[in-house]
Structure formats: structure tokens, C-alpha cells
Image (cartoon, rainbow, N blue to C red):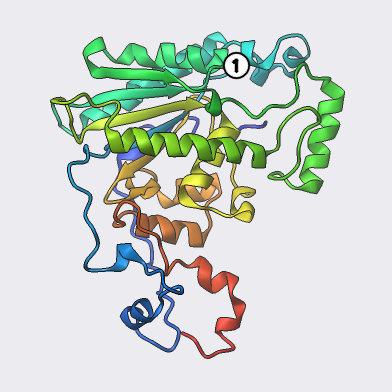
């Protein structure tokens, strides 16, 4: 998979205050926003996160301050595709450059965290079992002493898209060309996976991650802190699918995304929700592939409460084209 120049190194630029985007206009179909919510019962089901009587969850551990997605450093396969014909994908190593990228990535992450000026911060790692991701974590973690590492978990669902055992170089080139015609999300490699298959297993991982957050698995009793940082070390496509699943992006939106560079990071930071705009600039996210609608939703994510859905999201207007015909605003 070709890499993209967007985030080969997102260092100090991540910490600049993001420029304010124009807020999206709410969908108001012949009623005010509040009237629409009150009358929209979805049969007998309401929208509890919009209700003033919303049931508050009590005694839950603090939510992590941020989730940091890390793509592995440069691997042997990134330099020479023929490696895949003789070495199993899970056993491909980092290059020396890749190890240096991982170590530098760890330093950037620590610098980012220390700017919070919190004394009780820690990091917890989830890592793909592939050799190149494990080596990335080993080198990245050099930036953190033992007292700052809350723990780590090897997670097979974070593995790379399966391209099918040992690969025939010329056949793979032909298959990738066909994938561009068929569609990057649904095309399944022979004896391998499609991005849609990766989406299914990432959905399972996301539920595990949410459960870990809710029960405070990485925050022992008496040591719970809002300054926990989760770091997910994985692969380019897998991380793009993770973002797609987390933010509920469409297939069309996913297919416009690019890989971020080896050793690059994408940061989902807690505002009230978890917005990419807390660290990344609008220009960086556009280069990654985010559209106007996706950026507007990221603005909303900055103030969204955990579990809240954007019922007035801009996609509604772009998808349901009959609104204009009905004189809806």
C-alpha cells in the first residue's frame, strides 16, 4: 500500500490550536431543532442522549485523555515488495530507518503528553501481533520509563489486512489494479480479506476497547486518572478502518482516505467527545482525505458527550436530497 506524505511526522504542528471551522447548519424540517427532537420518537424509542432526564452513568472510571493511533515504522516490505514472496507477512521486520522512526515517534508522543502539565499521566498500549508492529512498540516505548507504562496488550484483531499468505508479486499488482476498479472497500483479495472484512473485526475490537474504558481495565483501583493515554500500534489500512468505524464514516468517505506515513500518528483527543481537530489542523486532515462534512462533524465531536450521536449531522442534508423539494431548511 502506498504511503502518503500527510503525517510522516506530525510533531509540533499537532499542538497548534486548530483553526475554527464554519459550524454546520442544523437540519430543521418545518420545525425548530427542539421541536424536531421532541416529536421524533422513532416509534416508541426516543433519543436518551437528547433528553434532559438523561440517565447519568455513575462511578465509571475517568475516560482516557486521548487515543493515539500509530502506524508502524518503515518495514522491509515498504522498501521491497518482493519480500512478501519469501517472508510471511506477519514475520516482516522493520528496517533500521523504521526503528529510528518508531523511536522518534515515542519522543513526540511523550512531548505531547508532557505539555498537559499533569503529574499522574500514563500510557497503555494495544499492538498488532505482526513483527513490524511489535518492533515499532519496542522502540517507541523507549521514551517511557516503567512507572509511566500502565500495561500493554497484543491484539490480533489489529493485524494488517490479509493479502493471502505468500504473495505472487505480479499477481498482486494485477489484483490491486482490479481493486481500484471494483472499489477499495469491498474488493477481497483471493485467499485474503477485503477492507470490509477488516471493518468487521475492528468493530469487535472497538467494543472490547469501549468495555476496557468503561471498566477501567488499564486503571487499577486507587490509581484512576483522567490523564491516561491509549496508544494503538497497527497498520495503515487497519487504522483508517478504525477511524471509519469510530466516527461512523461512510464507504465513500473511507475510499477517499490516504495512509499516513510510517511512524506517523493520528490523535483523537477528548474535548467532551474525541475530535481529530484537537491536535490536527484542518489542512492536515484535508490532506488525509477528510471532506467538508467530515470536518464539520469533527467540530461537533469537540463538544459531544460520550455516546451522543450527531442527529443533525451534515450528511443528512447531502444524502436525503428530497429535503429541498419539501421546503425544508
Task: Residue at 32%, 42% (x, y): give it.
Answer: 269
Relative to 278, does residue 135 appear above or below in the rendering? above
Task: Determine which quarter of the picture holds residue 109.
Answer: top left
x, y (%) of residue 41?
Answer: 40, 75
Q: Is residue 13 left or right of residue 259?
A: left
Q: Is residue 112 left or right of residue 6?
A: left
Q: Is residue 17 left or right of residue 243?
A: left
**Residue 127 visible in the shown view:** yes
Give the camera-side residue of 93 and 230. 230
Q: Residues within 10 Å of mark 1 (few under 14, many from 20)?
A: many
Task: Residue at 53%, 73% (x, y): give it.
Answer: 317
For label 1, the SS is: loop
Task: Residue at 50%, 52% (x, y): give it.
Answer: 248
Relative to 143, does residue 284 appear above or below in the rendering? below
Give the camera-side residue of 217 and 268. 217
Q: Is residue 58 left or right of residue 177?
A: left
Give the camera-side residue of 69 and 49. 49
Figure label count: 1
Please name the residue that numbered disc 1 is placed on. 75
x, y (%) of residue 249?
Answer: 53, 53
Q: Residue furthest front?
A: 44
Relative to 239, does residue 80 appear above or below in the rendering? above
x, y (%) of residue 17?
Answer: 29, 48
x, y (%) of residue 285?
Answer: 47, 48
**Residue 12 visible in the shown view:** no
Task: Residue at 36%, 36% (x, y): give it.
Answer: 211
Query: Which quadrant, please, contains the N terminus?
Result: top right
Amino acid at each position: 500500500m502506498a504511503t502518503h506524505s500527510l503525517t510522516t511526522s506530525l510533531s509540533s504542528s499537532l499542538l497548534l490550536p486548530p483553526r475554527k471551522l464554519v459550524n454546520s447548519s442544523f437540519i430543521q424540517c418545518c420545525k425548530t431543532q427542539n421541536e424536531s427532537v421532541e416529536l421524533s420518537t422513532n416509534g416508541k424509542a426516543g433519543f436518551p442522549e437528547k433528553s434532559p432526564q438523561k440517565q447519568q452513568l455513575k462511578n465509571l472510571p475517568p475516560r482516557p485523555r486521548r487515543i493515539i493511533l500509530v502506524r508502524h515504522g518503515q518495514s522491509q516490505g515498504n522498501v521491497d515488495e518482493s519480500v512478501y514472496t519469501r517472508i510471511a507477512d506477519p514475520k516482516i521486520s522493520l528496517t533500521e530507518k523504521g526503528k529510528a522512526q518508531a523511536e522518534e515517534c515515542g519522543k513526540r508522543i511523550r512531548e505531547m503528553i508532557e505539555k498537559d502539565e499533569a503529574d499522574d499521566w500514563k500510557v497503555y498500549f494495544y499492538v498488532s501481533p505482526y513483527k513490524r508492529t511489535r518492533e515499532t512498540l519496542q522502540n517507541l516505548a523507549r521514551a517511557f520509563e516503567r512507572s509511566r507504562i500502565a500495561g500493554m496488550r497484543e491484539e490480533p484483531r489489529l493485524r494488517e489486512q490479509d493479502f493471502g499468505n505468500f504473495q505472487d508479486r505480479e499477481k498482486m499488482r494485477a489484483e490491486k489494479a482490479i481493486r481500484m476498479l471494483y472499489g477499495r472497500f469491498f474488493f477481497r483479495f483471493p485467499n485474503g480479506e477485503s477492507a470490509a472484512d477488516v471493518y468487521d473485526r475492528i468493530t469487535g475490537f472497538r467494543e472490547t476497547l469501549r468495555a476496557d474504558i468503561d471498566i477501567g481495565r488499564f486503571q487499577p483501583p486507587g490509581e484512576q486518572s483522567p490523564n491516561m493515554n491509549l496508544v494503538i500500534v497497527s497498520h495503515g489500512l487497519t487504522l483508517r478502518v478504525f477511524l471509519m468505524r469510530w466516527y461512523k464514516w461512510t464507504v465513500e468517505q473511507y475510499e477517499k482516505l490516504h495512509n499516513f506515513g510510517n511512524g506517523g500518528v493520528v490523535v483523537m483527543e477528548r474535548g467532551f467527545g474525541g475530535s481529530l481537530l484537537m491536535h490536527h489542523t484542518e489542512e492536515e486532515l484535508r490532506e488525509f482525505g477528510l471532506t467538508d462534512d467530515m470536518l464539520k462533524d469533527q467540530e461537533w465531536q469537540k463538544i459531544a458527550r460520550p455516546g451522543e450521536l450527531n442527529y443533525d449531522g451534515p450528511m443528512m442534508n447531502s444524502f436525503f436530497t428530497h429535503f429541498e423539494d419539501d421546503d425544508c431548511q
